[in-house]
Image (cartoon, helix red, strand yellow):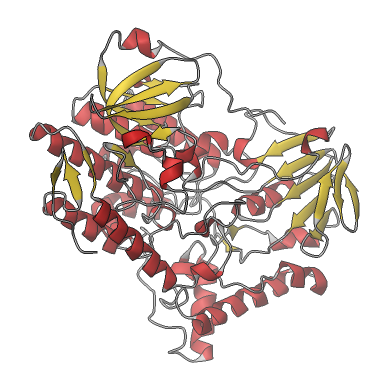
Amino acid sequence: MADSRENQTTSGSSMTEAFPGDAVLDVLIVGAGFAGLYALHKVRDQMGLTVRAFDIASDVGGTWYWNRYPGARCDIESIHYSYSFSDELQQEWEWSEKFAAQPEILRYLNHVADRFDLRRDIQFNTRITSMVWSEQQKHWQVGFEDGASISARFIISGAGNLSVPKTPEFQGIDDFQGEVYLTGNWPHTPVDFAGKRVGIVGTGSTGIQAISAIAKEAGSLTVFQRTPNYATPIGNGPADPQEISEVKANYPAIREASRNHFLGVPYSDVQPSALAVTADERRATFDNRWDRGGFRLFIDSYQDILVNKDANDTISDYIRERIHERVNDPAVAELLAPKGYAYGTKRPPLETNYYEVYNQDNVTLVDVRRAPIDSVTRTGVKTSEGEYEFDVLILATGFDAMTGPLMALGIVGRNGRTLQEKWAHGPQTYLGISVSEFPNLFLITGPQSPSVLYNMPLAIEDHVDFATDAIQYLRDRNLDAIEPDETSEAQWVQHANELAAATLLPGTDSWYMGANIPGKPRKCLVYLGGAPTYRKICADVVEGGYEGFVLDGAKVPATAN
């Protein structure tokens, strides 16, 4: 199975041509997705600094460049899953659907790159292989796969949270004689499934989207499911012109409301407790949120479903009941109904007619908990109970989330300490954006920040603004470096872990906990205090002169978290 992320010939001028001799960039940016594009615009156009962005892809888009699988779609409404930094951009762009599909999101990011003339400072088809801090020179030495290198005072990493696909674990995968596709690394040319025997492994968010789309075309589709998911309706449809007009007229207030909501969307109907109302009232609320679609059932129904097992049982039972209503065969419905873990402790998938797929004659569900996959053969997949022959095999097996993209950069901090060594027992960050012993390095939506539990474009803007404000703060004072104090970092890690322990998340094996990757430390990778609380903490840190950070060797008192 070829890796289409392998380097191609570097486009444009090389770094040695663009920055000859011992020139040092002010800022080096990793990635050209939502984070990289905004960071480039902010650093170059608003701060006037020397900057260059690098991406292994051949164009902009980040995760939306790679994840082109059938059915790929955002699970936040388009009007909210977009940049807020430019009112002109907000006003001019028109979304065609409530929840944009991958091609439209990619067009949007291309539009942003063109509108702000960003490509001229992005080097594509370029893989970073090392980032080594020089204590003597107070900058990072960044090496590339082709042997070139460049120095930069600061690094802003927009490497992404879900950008490194999980390595296939199945024995014999390289022996399969048919077509093999990884959803997180999908071909840029259309894949024809018509009349073909297709097998797909995985029923997470990605798998659910792909299954719904591929089932319409494939001659037969066999779904290998290990853990069923609590999938709920996305409620997609054409964008409502009147709603779009109202949003554009009130974008400042809507963005403010979004930033003051746990998930970064302006929902306002959440109730205190699922246990404080009657069964009929609770059912009416669940029905209302189910019908309205999106994450409203998850985040806009009751506040206690992620912290109280009894409250969670009410919504978990509700979703299981709705699954049974939609699947004709009771035995299949039972296999699709999740058990043994709480709703919301895995990323809640959103779907369109997913469960109805299993009513089609051309779709078969295989329970790999009962019949594990033994191997991939030359002709298909072998389980403990039988063999299945395929023309096409699709792996929707997820990502090495949050930490994987950073580990792949070859980061080495003070005294030769690698990030792998630093994070051997789980990520250690301050505010999820910086790491002690790794000065002048900013991790956009890094582990132990709200990240994937916050509307990503807004989370990215918050973090890029924090990073660039810190850079400007140092420049204004002729300071060389900024990094967290070890005590503040330890306190932040403890705070994030305590918040996670107060919820139901640690009770479930999920990529939120790093549990999907063999050997990965089992730690909660997201900050669960919500976006408003997190933003207030960050604002207080800045207001206090970057409390908890060491600035060029002068210690600043740590803030209490």
Residue 171: name its quadrant.
top right
Q: Position of residue 288 (x, y in %)?
A: 50, 74
Can you say whether 465 is above or below 454 in the image? above
Q: Residue furthest right?
A: 386
Q: Residue furthest bottom?
A: 278
Q: Residue furthest front?
A: 415
Residue 434: name its quadrant.
top left
Residue 56 visible in rendering: yes
Q: Position of residue 59 (x, y in %)?
A: 48, 25
Q: Residue furthest left?
A: 477
Q: Position of residue 535 (x, y in %)?
A: 25, 57
Can you say whether 289 is above or below 212 in the image? below
Horizontally, residue 305 falls left or right of residue 395, namely left
Camera-side residue: 61 or 138?
Answer: 138
Can you say whether 339 is above or below 40 in the image? below
Image quarter of the N terminus? top right
Q: Position of residue 354 (x, y in %)?
A: 68, 59
Question: Which residue is painted at 46% across and 73% down in the image?
Answer: 306
Camera-side residue: 45 or 138?
Answer: 138
Can you say whether 342 is above or below 210 in the image? below
Question: Which residue is painted at 11% across and 49% down in the image?
Answer: 545
Image quarter of the C terminus? bottom left
Residue 344 visible in rendering: no
Residue 31: name its quadrant.
top left
Horizontally, residue 382 falls left or right of residue 112, namely right
Horizontally, residue 173 falls left or right of residue 352, namely right
Question: Which residue is painted at 19% across and 41% down in the image?
Answer: 470
| Total numbered badges shown on the rendered structure | 0
Horizontally, residue 481 falls left or right of residue 397, namely left
